[in-house]
Image (cartoon, helix red, strand yellow):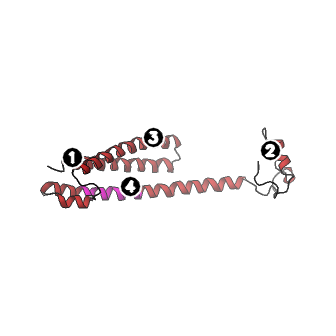
Amino acid sequence: MKFKNLIQTLETQINIYKEYIEIEKSKTNAVVNSDIIKLDGILSSEEILYMKSQSYEKKRINIMKSLNLENKTLLEVIDFAEGKEKDRLSEILEELSFYIDELKQVNECNKKLVKSRLDIISAITESFKDPEGKSGKNGGKIKYYGKNAKIAEQVERFDSSVIRKRI
């Protein structure tokens, strides 16, 4: 049983990927439902899971070093195994490939959802802005509020070539 520890570690990593997929699916629901509180909790869980996965990855690397197989892929490791261990390592390779692909798909879906939400928010935000300052009440003048109001009104008097950025 030369590869027993490696097999156990890889099986744990498969379970971590399964948890990641569930977290990503929960994240999808939170984004769709605009549930920021749930999303915050999910991100905390994801961070804990990330630290756990890093720990097992270090363990896997150390096991590979102890077997004098560092810098070898799992496919190459399978060639060194025999019997049931070889079969189990082959199954693990298939499972890892499957769960990593599924995780990529769910993650890509989440990216698109978040981008879509951000685009909508940007469009709404832009619709409230008037970059020219020509429309709205006050005859085209922009009203400034707060402690920088007088400074901002003074800045508008200068030519744009003099002032590089707006206060």
- Determine whether, in the image, residue 140 is placed left or right of residue 51: right
- Residue at image position (50%, 58%) is 112
**Circle on res. 144:** 2
Q: Secondary structure at mark 1?
A: helix
Residue nearest the viewer, comparing 108 with 150: 150
- Determine whether, in the image, residue 51 is placed left or right of residue 31: left
- Residue at image position (85%, 57%) is 159
Residue nearest the viewer, comparing 62 with 29: 62
The answer to whether the residue labelled 3 contacts the one labelled 4, judged by CB atoms less than 8 Å apart, is: no
Range drawn in magenta? 92-105
Asked if the magenta segment contains residue 99, the reply would be yes
Mark 1 or 4 closer to N-term? 1
Which amino acid lies under the numbered mark 1 shown in the image of this protein? Asn
Mark 2 or 4 closer to N-term? 4
Q: Can residue 90 be seen in this snapshot?
A: no
Mark 3 or 4 closer to N-term? 3
Picture coordinates of residue 136 (x, y %)?
81, 53
Q: Which residue is mark 3?
A: 44
Q: Secondary structure at mark 2?
A: loop
The answer to whether the residue labelled 1 contacts the one labelled 3, judged by CB atoms less than 8 Å apart, is: no
The answer to whether the residue labelled 3 contacts the one labelled 2, judged by CB atoms less than 8 Å apart, is: no
Q: Which residue is mark 4?
A: 103
Mark 3 or 2 closer to N-term? 3
- Specify the principal SS of the magenta part: helix
Picture coordinates of residue 36 (x, y %)?
53, 43
Dot 2, how many residues are within 10 Å of its Cα: few (below 14), some (14-19), or many (20+)?
A: few
